[in-house]
Amino acid sequence: MFETKIYKNRRNTLKKSLNSGLVLLLGNEESSMNYADNCYRFRQDSTFLYYIGLNKSRLAAIIDVDEDKEFLFGDDPTIDQIVWTGKVPSLQELTKQAGMDGCRPYEGIRAYFDQHAKDRKIHYLPPYRPGHTLKLQEWLGLAPEEIAAGKSVELIKGIVEQRNVKSEQELARIEEAVNMSGQMHLEAIRATRPGMKEYEVMSRVHQKALELGGRLAFPIILTKHGETLHNHSYDNTIEEGDMVLCDAGAEHPDGYAGDLTRTFPAGRHFNDLQRTAYNIVLEAQIAAVDILKPGVRFLDVHLAACKKLVEGLKHLNLMKGNPAEAVQAGAHAMYFQCGLGHLMGLDVHDMENLGEEYVGYTGDLAKSKQFGLKSLRLGRKVEPGFVVTVEPGLYFIPELIDYWGGQKKHEAFINYDKLEEFRDFGGIRIEDDYIVTEGGCRLLGNPIPKKSSEIEELRRKALEESTDE
Ligand code: GLY
Ligand code: MN
């Protein structure tokens, strides 16, 4: 948690961005896996963490914009709970830590609204947990279908404006998370041996995050089938000749995320084709980072990276025709089906729960519906202080090859005969995190190997060490 005054300042800025009304910020509750007392790891709601700072379950905050009053709702632990959980701060202590005006029992929220909300605007965020939907129904007397429609766009916009620009203190946490993430990747590249199961390497990556005092910012992707964008199965045996894609990031104890991806050979070297494809992805990342600066739309950065990918794919005879026209038609999405990156902060996809139309896009820039572009989470202009990932890739998805191939889709740009040779090629992604600065952007965290020659050197050393043992 930061100093109390940081949270007070953040709330004051939020209050100024709203005309009037009551703001409800809902903290998260424990979430059960298979019976009530066996819970997933607790994760506080990121907006609650940003404005209140308290990483405890079953809390809520009500901010009265007109009266300039802030209340924390929660409950002191009973002696029965303390027996199981140990001593925890009282509600009074938590209220003081957060710098709020007072506190009330959690069950008092309904009564508070009954008393204070008549004819007033209640600002709340779109819920992403069913439990929150139920609470909003009960407290605000709304029908389920009214909840989404009733969200406060004014509140969302105020929050997005604040959370988008990272302070020095936030940036320091993010860099720590990125550095932990870098260590996780070095561990993956060093630990992998042909013959291992993916889960064996994945467990080492997870262990590294824990060992460094972090957690996972999202479930690890560690797979020889990198063509599946969010592959969360780990059962394959890694074999000589495979490429391994690791997309993993640590979460700092204060909640901030890192998110990196490296792709490396299971053996000492990439084969020639793998290395060529790897270098195409790297060139696309370099081209994107070159133009990433304030005032540039991330959409245009994405499109520039796509064009670079197509130019490389033409050299491999996988694409043909004019690269700019191919990208405009969406033909590159045979190989790059997702977006170039996303905002990152307290969430790995920062503020995605608030709605992409407010976070990644603006009133005058709506998200495209085109296959590929529709998965670009961030399109708007970036500004100094924004933290983004840049993660181009090439993905050879057999099902998509067959699906588009059957329709001869984008035949003017895609060389389907050649593509047949790549059905089992897999996928490559390279991902790093950047802060947009006044003059451009800066890599976050200590650089970890990225050039194909650097990755191969790490693999050579790792495999030699295992021969020496
Ligand atoms: N690292 C996972 C993602 O960006 O979706
Ligand atoms: Mn990412």
Image (cartoon, helix red, strand yellow):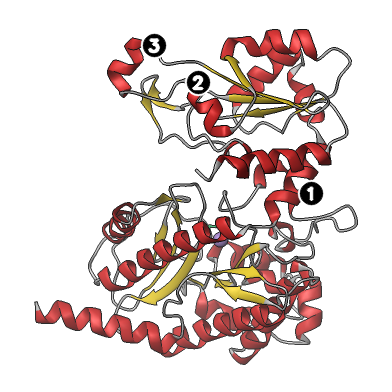
Q: To which residue does mark 3 refer?
A: 78
Locate residue 388, reporting x and y percent: 63, 64
- The answer to whether marks 2 and 3 mark residues whose Cβ atoms lie closer than 8 Å is no
Element marked by disc 1: helix
Which mark is nearer the camera, 2 or 3? 2
Locate residue 423, reporting x and y percent: 51, 72
- The answer to whether marks 2 and 1 mark residues whose Cβ atoms lie closer than 8 Å is no
- Mark carried by residue 357: 1
- Mark carried by residue 91: 2
Left or right: 231, with 191 as reference point: right
Sequence-first tag of 2 and 1: 2
Left or right: 334, with 276 as reference point: right
Sequence-first tag of 2 and 3: 3
**Residue lying at 81% horizontally and 27% vertically, measured from the top left:** 150
Q: Amino acid at mark 2?
A: Leu
Q: Quadrant of ligand 1?
A: bottom right
Q: Amino acid at mark 3?
A: Thr
Residue 58 shows in the view: yes
Element marked by disc 2: helix
Q: Amino acid at mark 1?
A: Glu
